Image (cartoon, helix red, strand yellow):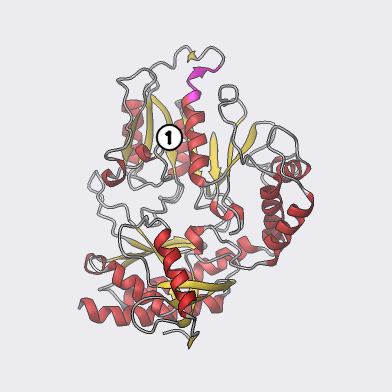
Amino acid sequence: MSNTNTYNPSIAELDSILLGQKIHFNHYGNSKMPFACLSAKGISQTFIKIDGENIGETFDVFDVSGGYGSACLGASHPVPKQALIRAVENVGYVTDEIASKERSQLLVNLLGPNGLWNQYFPESRYRVSGRNSGSEGMELALRLILESRFDTRNLKYKPGLEERNTILAFEGAWHGWTSGLVPLLNRRHYRIGLPNTSTSEPYGVKIDHIPFGDSKVLEEYFQEKKDQLLAVIVEPIQGDAGIIIPPEGYLRHLSGLCQSNETLLVADEVLTFAKTGKYFAMNDKEGHIPTDITVIGKSLGMGVLSTSMVISRKDLTIRSSGGVSTSDLRPITCAVINDGIQFVEEAKLLSNAIELGEYIKQLSAELVLKFPDVYQEARGIGVMHGIELTEKSTAKLAELRNCIIRNGVYVEFMAGAGRRSHGKRYIYPTMRIAPALISTKQEIQTVFERLSTASKEFEGVII
């Protein structure tokens, strides 16, 4: 157990926390966790037990979930705090209909002639739109894909694109919760009973899925479907599938196939953004890998705002007013992103992610070797790692997670890719280790010491 003390909350205070928890919609399909967060700083959080034994007991927890991978600067960081204060006091709230000094400064800093990302996305070829979340960003990417087939003025197919009615996604991929994105998932649990895709209707589209990371299967698919293929949507590292990193050269090969076949390539970098030691995971030993649309999010909001950016080729358009959004890069959002990225650069946090990543990789491998009944494989890069469970421990996943939290580490578990075609092995649920960029080596060491203690305790339950 991590450091504990008794908070002695009043009955009214505990009742209020529990009532609020009951009012909050439970999306997880099981009992809510018997803990509440009282405060946080950096990756350290103070939890209180609100149910079961020792109600009112508080204990410190190191969070390596990063708020679903979004809090790259941890909690209570002064940079986004000061950005929010500055923005509320000065920058206003104009929509994208009116130019904003803060928005323009951000976009020029990123994509302008001397911009941080100009070598990947020069302003002469790309433009940017903002959305509230990664899911909304992916919805806009999907809209750009579908409308690429059309003359947006006459709302008719462009000549020669009538048969381009197929989008390729990958088994185990995750692109968002919205009804428009669910068809991109090959998971029956999330798709059944919701609107589906069909080419039997006018302007319909269908989704195909193949295993991720297999160049032979990819080539065979392109050979068979190239005349129908409109777009490919890919996570450069699969997140919810269990942190699956493709073989070297796979993503560049995919990009080349798309270019030669005039097929749009969409990179879903909502999760991977700024976690691999680079801003973009569409990268290999040769450098940046070209895409037509790239969606970034999560860490982009520095842990204080939910936001995303869609970076797309200038020639990809949407019918007039069809892409308007209430929150398309509002000035307050731009202030947080601008100041946050400037701090990431000044503090060399991407380099820190590479160093932390090597240490996490070492400690993860040691954990797997030490507890082979609990874990079977570790995978990852930078501050984006996964430790896959065994079949035996998967059966008691909820118990394992509660045990880990009680011992002072807050983690989340990804579903894993599950069943895959073409003889690929089953991927079990995977513990995600995605600490903030500001985490220290000492904090990571403490995290794994606590994970080891929790795993030892849990091991006695399953053996």
Rendering quarter of residue 108: top right
Residue 129, horizontal then vertical, whole percent: 61, 37
Crowd rating for badge 1 (residues with CA inside 10 Å; few <14, some 14–19, many 20+): many
Residue toward you, 132 or 53: 53
Q: Residue reaching furthest left?
A: 463
In the rendered structure, does residue 233 fall within the stretch colored magenta? no
Residue toward you, 257 or 103: 103
Of the 4 image quadrants, the one containing the C terminus is bottom left
Residue 237, horizontal then vertical, whole percent: 44, 51
Can residue 142 be seen here? yes
Please give left or right for residue 67 compared with residue 387 in the image.
right
Residue toward you, 249 or 459: 459
Can residue 432 be seen here? no
Residue range in magenta is 147-152
Instruction: Give the amino acid type for the residue marked by disc 1 in the picture.
Output: Val
Residue 317, horizontal then vertical, whole percent: 57, 25
Q: Residue reaching furthest front?
A: 12
Q: Could you tell me which residue is drawn at 54 percent across and 40 percent down?
A: 294
What residue is pinned by disc 1?
Answer: 232
In the rendered structure, does residue 149 fall within the stretch colored magenta? yes
Residue 161, horizontal then vertical, whole percent: 44, 17
